Image (tube, helix red, strand yellow):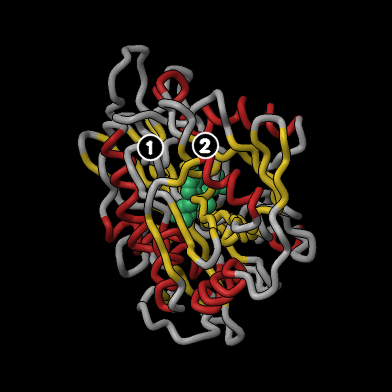
Amino acid sequence: MQTVSNSIIVEKVKHSKIDKVDFNNLSFGKYFTDHMMVCDFKNGAWEVPRIVPYQPISLDPSAKIFHYGQSVFEGMKAYKDKDQNVWLFRPLENQKRINISSKRLAMPEFPEDYFMDGLKALLKLDQKWIPTAEGSSLYIRPFVFASGCGFHASPSDEYKFIIACSPSASYFAGKVKVLIEEKYSRSANGGVGFAKAGGNYAGQFYPTQLAVEKGYNQVIWTDDNNHEYIEEAGAMNIFVRINDTLITSPTSDRILDGITRKSIIDIAKDENIAVEVRKITVKEVVEASENGSLKEMFGAGTAAVISPIATFGYQGRDYDLPEIKNSYASTLKKRITDIQYNKAEDKFGWRYQV
Ligand code: PLP
Ligand code: COI
């Protein structure tokens, strides 16, 4: 045991398992690094964070996470540049958002210094795990859940905050095919759609399974009222290009305020691309596809980065997107990943050195 200067307790592994991982064959979120950060909330306060060997967690069967789903998470990435420097992308946005999510689920907010100091200490310890192959990175998963006991349906009095990391390749392996949802809803006004709550993802699994059986990768969620407006996809925000204008839905109670989404809006404006943040009807996307003005559709998210959509399905019909050169998706992806991997100037001040 050793204590680092910022009071985070560190217990290192005796033997690293890094040699067991084939870094040439990484998928997404399958392997985990040697260490994790753990912090307990007890007696009304967060205790000092600890970095410990990555290991299973023991919980009482009555822990409230199992019954009432009090759990929220974040998704971030660490990138290594050619000189082996380690970078994060807008980490304070994730730190703020996990607390926005926690608040909505009646969970205690996590202090900024514990989040940042713990994350940096963890990344310094496990930096060898950050892959350097094109498109790969260290996916970072901070999460909080109710570890307190009891069947009473009320907020837990104890929580665990954990950060686990996974060297990962791209989220989507090939062309992305999405299905525009007509029946199920991901979220509703006044609900928890804007939070990164575990339950939002559990609720998507069944409709997504039905879409996967039909050959699609993800569902594009529409509003819960009339399924009239395009909202977001299962793990990413959605952008549509009609003629030369890039359009994305405004965020709301129902839509996650994606960090990639807002960065893409800023970069697109900087590229002098016309950007509209407004409601997008399914009808206009279908019509634009039919009359040839729909040029691109892509998803944007930490895991997905920018994932061009090749086909969307709607009402039993598939609509293919044209293959275009110099697409907005490729320009914007290059701009954002060049910032993330420290390959270009960062005029927005988003890069954060660990
Ligand atoms: N929407 C959903 C439902 C997501 O799970 C994600 C992924 O985090 C996003 C959008 C994109 O958000 P971000 O760019 O902050 O990763
Ligand atoms: C992310 O992009 O970080 C996400 O949280 C999406 C996740 C469902 C893989």
- Residue shown at 44% from the left, 58% from the top: 261
Q: Position of residue 224 (x, y in %)?
A: 43, 28
- Residue shown at 61% from the left, 65% from the top: 137
Quadrant of the rendering where the C terminus is positioned: bottom left
Badges 2 and 1: C-beta atoms under 8 Å apart? no
- Residue shown at 71% from the left, 59% from the top: 322
The residue pinned by badge 1 equals 254
Residue 144 appears in the rendering: no
Q: Quadrant of residue 159?
A: top left
Answer left or right for 160 relative to 12: left
Q: Nearer the viewer, residue 192 or 264?
A: 264
Q: Position of residue 284 (x, y in %)?
A: 52, 45
- Tag 2: amino acid: Trp
- Tag 1: amino acid: Arg
Answer left or right for 323 relative to 341: right
Q: Nearer the viewer, residue 204 or 153?
A: 204
